[in-house]
Image (tube, helix red, strand yellow):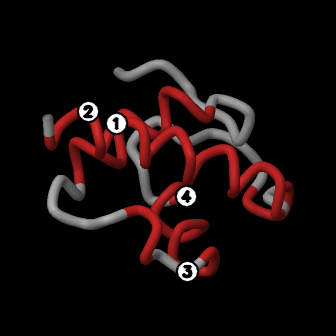
């Protein structure tokens, strides 16, 4: 079983999103979709209602960093 992840685990979430959606540019993803993608990750164990704009921004930036690394 994967370890539990929470909204504050931006780096881990970014890695998992990059693995799940390798061809999707994170900067084109709306926050409503990003929130859904995170909630659907295996191991996500946080309260879905605890998401907010700063947490989603941190996740988006962590995912973007992984996306850029994969391109190079």
Which secondary structure lies at badge 1? helix
Name the quarter where the C terminus is drawn.
top left
User: Which structural element holds mark 2?
Assistant: helix
Q: Find the distance from the CA under tag 4 to the CA under tag 3.
A: 14 Å
72 or 33: nearer the eye? 72
- Residue 28 higher or lower than 63, as above or below: below
Q: Is residue 42 left or right of residue 18?
A: right
Per the model, the C-alpha gap separating discs 3 and 2 is 21 Å
Q: Which mark is residue 69?
A: 2
Q: Earlier in the sequence, mark 1 or mark 3?
A: 3
Measured in 3D between alpha carbons, the distance from the residue under mark 2 to the one under mark 1, in whole angstroms, is 5 Å
> Alpha-carbon neighbours of circle 1 within 10 Å: few (<14), some, or many (≥20)?
many
Circle nearer the viewer, 2 or 4: 2
Residue 71 horizontal side relative to residue 10, left or right: left
List the residue tagged with mark 4. 39
Task: Check whether the beta carbons of the residues at disc 2 and disc 1 lie within 8 A of each other.
Answer: yes
Could you tell me residue 36's position as x and y percent? 53, 70
Separation (CA) of disc 1 from disc 3: 18 Å
Viewport quadrant of the N terminus: top left
Picture residue at 47% right of the left edge, 35% below the top: 43
- Residue occupying image coordinates x 49% and y 38%: 13
**Residue 51 x, y percent position in the rendering:** 79, 58
**Would you name the residue on which mark 3 appears?**
30
How crowded pointer 2 is (Cα within 10 Å; few <14, some 14-19, many 20+) is rated as: few
């Amino acid at each position: 079983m994967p370890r539990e992840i929470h909204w504050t685990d931006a780096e881990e979430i970014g890695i998992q999103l990059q693995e799940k959606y390798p061809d999707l540019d994170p900067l084109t993803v709306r926050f409503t979709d990003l929130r859904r993608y995170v909630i659907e990750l295996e191991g996500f164990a946080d309260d879905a209602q605890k998401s907010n704009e700063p947490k989603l921004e941190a996740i988006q930036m962590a995912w973007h960093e992984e996306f850029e690394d994969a391109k190079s």
